[in-house]
Image (spheres, rainbow, N blue to C red):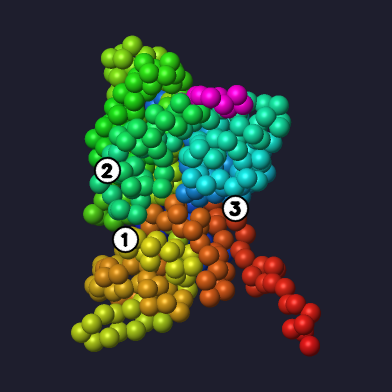
Amino acid sequence: MNERNTLKINQDGHLEIGGADAVSLAKQFGTPLYVFDEAYIRRMMGVYRDTILKKYDGNGLVLYASKAFSCQAIYRIADQENIGVDVVSGGELYTALQAGFPAEKIYMHGNNKLDYEIGEALDAKIGCIVADSYSEIDKIDAEAAKRGMVQTILLRINPGVEAHTHAFVQTATTDSKFGFSIANGTAEKITAYALTKKNVKLAGYHCHIGSQIFEKESFVIAVTKVMDFAAEMKEKLRFTMETLNLGGGFGIWYTDEDRKIPPEGYAEYLEALIGEVQRKAQEHDMQEPFLLIEPGRSIVGEAGVTLYTVGAIKEIPGVKKYVAIDGGMFDNPRYALYESKYTPILANRATEACTELVSIAGKCCESGDMIAVNVSLPKAQSGDILAILSTGAYNYSMAMNYNRNMIPPCVLVHEGKAEYIVRPQSYEDLNRNDVIPERLKK
């Protein structure tokens, strides 16, 4: 059923995730439930790590893009797999540090880092900050001076590559809140500005062209443009790029409309980038930069499945049939945001043929609270266990307490056994920070 060994159907006709029966997981932990296959996560981290080792002589580092899924357990796995991480907030940084992740292998992103987040990064002595504004460079320089240190930074630049993906997740077109454009000269200007700072060490550049991209050409074009720009800065400003961060954005399978790439297939994407870096370095007589990449979705996306219990079923004759679940946009807002598509399966009846076209509705008081629209299923019944595949990335990390629903827990499956990595919320958790002013108690 699945080339990635994350999913299969067992002898009972149930969906298995990492060797664990999905129906048993739903019974043990309840639903909604996020389930992650540890073996698949480690396999994907290893593919990227080993490709840099073999094809680039180890002159680089994989950074897990933790915005895809952040919790202490994922940082422990990343550390054990000898890769780095990137964080995009003080909360992600705190979580990584609490997990004991080495600060020197943490890189921080963000287009508007808050003052206290910059301070926390400097106090932790993280490896690098990716700067994205003049004011941020000023703040890093000033705060580093107070601490008697020099902070390494990269500059986020915009190569102007339009990737073939949803407009909401393109980040390197001319009009973007991220980065400084090579084409209009602003990338050169901020490079010159950063080089004037005494407590900031500019090591190189970062670019990220978007997310859920399948074709290699966009990535390669971005490399070409950034390497050409770096050669120009060497000529004009006598600045030598030591580090190049090419971001992430590799696509994953959500439905049969997407290309199915086995884990080792992602090595080909990275090899294409490495080859272009080497070619341009030779062309411009430049040193090959220390190479960073930031896969997130492709590491955890297909490793994750969300389990639900089917509740109410409502059919509007001649219009639509709704199958309602005990979750919704509070645990997966991606359909509401992007009309993202997913593949559902009845985990307790996984061998049955699909006979109906249905729409899977959440329990929130919003008409737009849908998980999947016009998808094929066997005739669903109340109490069935519904699995939504490829939900490991940007589901838990985007979850919320809308309608005061509780964010589901996460479990990690290892050799068929599951353990909590994020515990369930309770009603007490929902009310923990509520305060009733004295005047309202009368």
Instruction: Specify the amino acid type for callout 3.
Output: Ile
Instruction: Specify the amino acid type for callout 2.
Output: Glu
**Would you identify the image quadrant in which residue 442 lies?**
bottom right
Q: Is residue 87 magenta?
A: no
Instruction: Left or right? Give the position of 315 relative to 407.
Output: left
Instruction: Specify the amino acid type for callout 1.
Output: Lys
Q: Helix, strand, or loop for circle 2?
A: loop
Q: Helix, strand, or loop for circle 3?
A: strand
Comparing labels 2 and 1, the label whose residue is closer to the camera: 2
Work out whether mark 2 precedes mark 1 in sequence or the reverse, and give the earlier one: 2
Comparing labels 1 and 3, the label whose residue is closer to the camera: 1
Work out whether mark 1 precedes mark 3 in sequence or the reverse, and give the earlier one: 1
Q: Which mark is residue 421?
A: 3
Say above or below: 367 vs 81.
Answer: below
Residue 167 pos. (x, y %) = 30, 53
Residue nearest the viewer, comparing 210 with 353: 210
